[in-house]
Image (spheres, grey):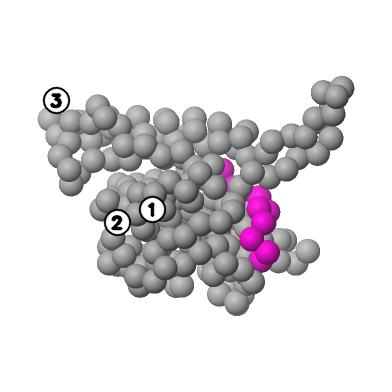
Amino acid sequence: MNTRMKRSTAILAICCLLLATGIGASALLFAPDRLATNVVSSGTALVGGQFEATNQDGKRVSEKDFLGKHTLFYFGYTFCPDICPAELQVISAALSGIESAADKFNLAFVTVDPARDTPEIMKQYVAHFWPGTIGLTGSAEDIKKIASAYRVYYSRPDSQDTDEDSYLMDHSSIIYLMGPDGKFVRHFPFGTSADDIRKALVAATSS
């Protein structure tokens, strides 16, 4: 099998996995509170929390730096061949359609591949998307903690026949919207259109 066929097969497999994990992750976003009768009484969001990371300028930041505005969090990596840049373009289009969006929203792109995504790489990458997009990286432990807080799945498959510079990552593809208080508002599954995201963001800031 030549290199092009291997890459196509890997990308197809990842796309299928992302669709599956996106559906599964959506179901895991809430942990229902159950009464003794096993009747669901309410739902408590299990998304978000404390974290520390390094932004694209090399500055250490935490969840507190995102308070005061609604924040969209998306997890991926800069070497992603298609899905990550496509989703960031969708988010960028949604935000670009909102008047004075920069005064109301943050957009944070969190890498799941900190070994390759240095602050310098992240800075070059986020510059291609919505102005003001924040790139977050850090140590492997930093990323593990923030991914856990946001219930994000990611993994580097051991079976890949690739070198250290060209491997692909498996990861869930969900956009998380957090409120100005840092609490979970809602999520957008993979494939949500820019227009639908824009409408939801406008509604969130109008309520």
Q: Earlier in the sequence, mark 1 or mark 3?
A: 3
Q: Position of residue 13 (x, y in %)?
A: 35, 29
Mark 3 lies on a secondary structure that is loop
The magenta segment? 180-191
Q: Amino acid at mark 2?
A: Asp
Q: Amino acid at mark 3?
A: Met
Q: CB of mark 2 within 8 Å of CB of mark 1?
A: yes
Q: Position of residue 57 (x, y in %)?
A: 35, 72
- 82 or 53: nearer the viewer: 53
Residue carrying label 3: 1
Residue carrying label 1: 111
Mark 1: few, some, or many residues within 10 Å (few <14, many ≥20)?
Answer: many
Q: Position of residue 190 (x, y in %)?
A: 51, 43
Q: Nearer the viewer, mark 2 or mark 3?
A: 2
Q: Is residue 117 visible?
A: yes
Q: CA distance from mark 2 to mark 3?
A: 29 Å
Residue carrying label 2: 117
Q: CB of mark 2 within 8 Å of CB of mark 3?
A: no
The quadrant in which residue 167 appears is: top left
Q: Amino acid at mark 1?
A: Thr
